[in-house]
Image (cartoon, rainbow, N blue to C red):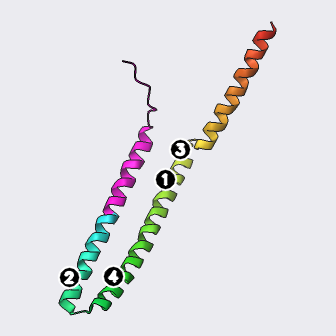
Amino acid sequence: MDRPETPQKHPLAETFERVWSQALLAVSTAEEEAVRTVQRVAHVAGWSQEEMIRQARLLTDRLTGHRKDLEHNVDEGVRRTLVSLKVPRREQIQDIEARLARLAERIDALGQRK
């Protein structure tokens, strides 16, 4: 029962994925709690349906902006960390693989000449 090999993830990549997922879950949970809070405040304050919708929209817009800022900051932090670790980008690895393939072809061609 041979299984095709699945590519192994780099431990650093797995850590970043886990941290990113946890951050997104925390933001989503905060957004849900904010909506529930607006509904409670609306009930206590006696807001009309229109005022509650307006306040919820304002809060949603602010949370969306904060979420985008958070995503950008995490992405930028990951990018800076990877640059400082000198981890090659996917494009660089693909370029190296292409160069190795060309070299292998040249070596094969030289071997056939003899």
Considering the numbered disc 2 on the image, is that residue within a helix, a strand or a loop?
helix
Considering the numbered disc 3 on the image, is that residue within a helix, a strand or a loop?
helix
Percent coordinates x, y for residue 108 in the rendering? 73, 15
Name the residue located 36 percent from the left edge and 18 percent from the top edge. 1
Of tags 3 and 4, which is closer to the observer?
4
Label the magenta part by its dominant secondary structure.
helix
Say what amino acid the circle numbered 1 marks: Val
Q: Quadrant of the C terminus?
A: top right
**Which sits earlier in the primary sequence, circle 4 or circle 2?**
2
Q: Is 106 in the magenta?
A: no
Disc 2 versus disc 1: distance between alpha carbons?
A: 38 Å
**Which sits earlier in the primary sequence, circle 1 or circle 3?**
1
**Magenta region, residue range:** 1-26
* 23 in relation to 33, above or below: above
Q: Which residue is mark 3?
A: 85
Say what amino acid the circle numbered 2 marks: Arg
Give the number of the disc on residue 56. 4
Considering the numbered disc 1 on the image, is that residue within a helix, a strand or a loop?
helix
Percent coordinates x, y for residue 35 in the rendering? 28, 76
Q: Which residue is mark 2?
A: 40
Q: Residues within 10 Å of mark 3 (few under 14, many from 20)?
A: few
Q: Are marks 2 and 3 in contact (CB under 8 Å)?
A: no
